[in-house]
Amino acid sequence: MITDLISKEFSESLEKGKSFFLKYDYVRVLAHYDGDGTSASIILTKLLLRNNKKFHLGFIKDLSSEGFSKRIMEEPNLPTIVVDAGSDQLKFLKGDTAEILVLDHHFYSGESKNELNINARDFGIDGTREACGATMAFVFALFISEENADLLPFMVSGAIADKQDLGSFRGLNKTLIEKYGKNVEKKHVLNLDGESILDALVYSVDPFIKNISGSLEGTRKVLEKLSINPETKPEDLTREDTLKLGSYLGYVLSFQGAHSEAMSYLEKDEMYFNNGFSASLLAKIIDANSKNGDNNIPIEFFMGNNSLKNEMISNKRKYETRLIDYITRSYKSITKEKNLQFFYAPGSEMAGAISGQLMLYLLDQDKPVIGFNVGDDSTLISSRGNRRMVERGLNLSKVMKECTEKVGGSGGGHDIAAGGSIPRGMERQFIEIADEMIGKQLNPNKNE
């Protein structure tokens, strides 16, 4: 039982959420638009259908005061479930609204606290490494009924999309996988997915390998050099070929400056679900469609519309092609400040994905990276650090919150990854303020 795996306080909070769930016959679901939020929304929509609840689903990108409030106030009288967001945004709401149930894992200020704001962090769970939005949705579904244990694949895909598998699953994620994934097939493999090893390498974003990712010619040369048949499926590689390829890719990643955190992502303990997808492929498909703005496609597919499979997989390929191009272009245009590095994303709404891959695989590992996505009126910001910086004191959630507010915006997130929004034209001022604050976090004793 899920109650055996979580604290009494967590169970009591979920009981209040369950009362909300049972109270209404029709609710709105708002999920963060990314891979974690979309995975969480799959869990919730299946849960609602199984309980004969009517609902409509929407996604939210702008978590600023104005953006969140506007989304809620589109239908202020409709009971709403917000997942993978909401804890820190409830304080933005003015006036009367219907009840709002929040299932979240991000940092938030105490002023947003209420009995239906269910956040992993309030129960001693690290929302950066141990539980994501999909984790919270899965726990909630289990609390409604243990028969929802079959929704585990979407919890895992959300955690992978949020990079919570980096260095292996831990905390609540690990506990849930061990409890509810006992019969799932597992195999230790290279972190590569595709119809062939050639395909897997050419379209590999995670890991991102210079002169291989995005390069058909470069990939062919490497496989020829290693005497590996390019048409072999990644999972069918012999042990000898796996070791050869793994060693070579490790050398390339090391040479291009990737941190040990990224090196550990070169291989994985893969899970193979009975829905026909591995955990990694499922996460990549859902995340890619989400980032393309096609969140509805994987949701409809996993609700039973099998005709969408080819389009869903094709969207993944298109996204990976575009992201590889954007990573390459952004890498060439990086600007370095004293304590941070930044770039302007070449494509809309891609700054977060670009920042994550740049930080893991290509950039200076002693400075966090900030990516700007400039819109008509506002600029969205995404920031990424690494575990070593966090251990030294980096907290990008605080940086995004405090520095965006100083230039008329808002922000927040995790210590290692956070985002925000500022008025267009304030990018340079924001960088100067953030650079100073990050310097104080990473070097607290420097000026004493």
Image: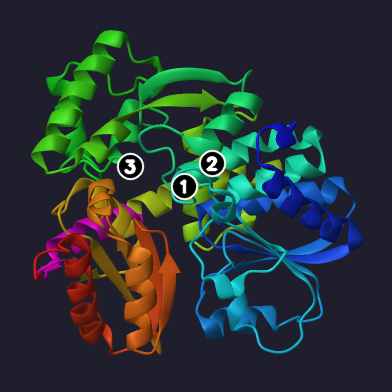
Q: Is residue 103 above or below residue 307?
A: below
Image coordinates of residue 212 in percent, x first then y, are 20, 39
Amino acid marked by disc 1: Ala
Left or right, 356 with reference to 275: left
- Of the residues tagged 3 and 1, which is closer to the observer? 1
Q: CA distance from mark 1 to mark 2?
A: 6 Å
Residue 261 vs residue 343, the one in the foreground: 261
Q: Earlier in the sequence, mark 3 or mark 1?
A: 1
The residue closer to the viewer here, 112 or 219, is 112
Q: Position of residue 90 (x, y in %)?
A: 62, 75
Q: CA distance from mark 3 to mark 1?
A: 11 Å
Q: Which mark is residue 157?
A: 2
Colour logic: rainbow
- Residue count near mark 1 (Cα–Cα under 10 Å), binned few <14, some 14–19, many ≥20: many
Q: Which mark is residue 206?
A: 3
Asked where in the image residue 303 lies, by quadrant, the reply is top right
